[in-house]
Amino acid sequence: MVKLTKTLITVFFLLLKLDNKDVLSLFRVLHWQPNAGTTVNTQILNEVSQCVESINGVKEGRWKATLTYYKPMLRDQSQAPELPRDFLGISLPEQPNKYYFIIRGQRIVLEADSSIQTIMEKLQSYKSRVALYFEGFQYQLGDFQLRVGKVTPTHSDNLRGIIMEVEYLPLSSLEKSRQVMEEFVDIWQEAISKRSLPGHFMHIEPSFVEYGLSDHYSSQHTAVQYATVMAQLIATQSVQAARN
Amino acid sequence: MECVVQGIIETQHVEALEILLQGLCGVHKEHLRVHELCLKSGPNLGHVGSEVRLLCDLEHPEPWTVKHVGGALRGSGAEQLSVMVRNMVESKASKNVLRLFYALGYKLDHELLRVGSAFHFKRGARITVTVSSINKMLKLHAIDDTVPVTLGIQVVEVTAPATSENYSEVAAAMSSFCEYLAPLLHLSKPGVSTGVVPTAAAAAASLMSDGGGTTL
């Protein structure tokens, strides 16, 4: 059965190679949703990594993204103007010279040069409240590149989540690649479910249109996905904390 | 960080200045039409107020430029220079940068439209010379409905990027270049008012009759 699954996966990717037209790629970011009453841990992360390798994913190297929540600096703390509490910045490994700002509540995403961080430091109106690393290993799997990573605060090893980034290399159109991506994710979900882990991977597709983004995929789309994942991780942990 | 000097010239002499610049720099002028928005932090935001400039090059509307201009370098070494050395950081940004800064609590302090020309060249340093009229908008963001801030006068700005290690050399290169422009206009540190030079009319007439002159 395992051999048959592996064969099917190999054939699937070979067929995809025949349809290589575009050069930009498309990402889907999934996060681990633990079952009620359970928490994410490193054993799950190890099982996920092993699962990728079991479906012939070739380990290529490490990757890291950083996400920073900003807070406004107020002269008079008693007067709190209407300022965003969900203002965050993201650096992505595929765009080392860029930085992304997002205000989820207002559906704003901005792509800027990395020097925008220096400008924000000079302005002194917002400062970093908490920063998190998304880091792990990346794997090549036919026309897909997978990144499996843990989510940890920058000054701690406390595991806050597990994410998986699926990059489909040949296409950059969201609509055209939707079926291919969903088929891959279905295969992946079936593979990981065989390990009977206490949870599953979830993908919540943000409404890119609300952010003013087009069907043509870009790193701004990825940044929005990361922001959405973080919101989910926070919501999950809030529910768990309330239960405890 | 950047080195910068500014001056003013009467609009009637701009053509002569552009002929001189083209001869000196060996490059063609680029059209300049930049919408500049100056934003300031709202009350209570930041322990001290802050200011940021957003620039939209209307010739190439994307990306925008975010610019933070800091204070001038202090100390006897910097003060002896004929150019101002100041902190400056720029970043390109996607088109909704204005919406982002509004959401962060920044307010529009003023906006203006710079229309003119720019020369980019290398002469001991990477120098940029802009010659432009400064126009204010009669309505919010109305870039097609503007009037000059000062009729008949254009601003000349000479800038060059620098670092803390090389600003002296950059300043020297700029000063050396600016000497060639002296017959037409006087360039000085921003904030130091000089007015138009009395030799400008004669120098301009000479350049115009010369039909361009030779590259120096």
Image: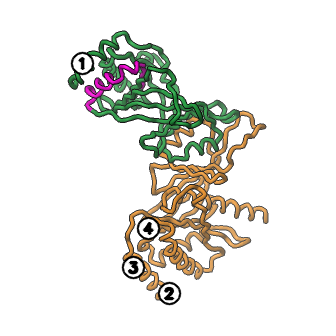
Chain colours: A orange, B green
Residue A197 versus residue A128: which sits nearer the camera? A128
Q: Sequence-wise, which precedes: disc 2 or disc 3?
A: 2
Q: Of the residues under marks 4 and 3, which one precedes in the sequence? A: 3
Residue type, numbered disc 4: Leu
Q: Which residue is mark 4?
A: A171
Residue type (three-letter) at the residue carrying disc 1: Ser
Secondary element type, mark 1? helix
Residue matched to label 2: A2
Vertical side of B122 occupied by A183: above or below: below
Q: CA distance from mark 4 to mark 3?
A: 15 Å
Q: Is residue B55 visible?
A: yes
Q: For the residues carrying marks 1 and 2, which lies nearer the camera in this image? A: 1
Q: Are marks 4 and 3 on the same chain?
A: yes
Instruction: Report the amino acid beneath label 2.
Output: Val
Three-letter code for the amino acid on which mark 3 is drawn: Leu
Q: From which residue to which does the magenta span run?
A: B4-26
Within-10-Å neighbours for mark 2: few <14, some 14–19, many 20+: few
- Is A69 left, or right, of B215 in this rendering? right
Q: Residues within 10 Å of mark 4 (few under 14, many from 20)?
A: many
Residue B209 numbered tag: 1
**Which image quadrant for residue A140?**
bottom left
* Residue of label 3: A14
Residue B196, percent from left and from top: 41, 14
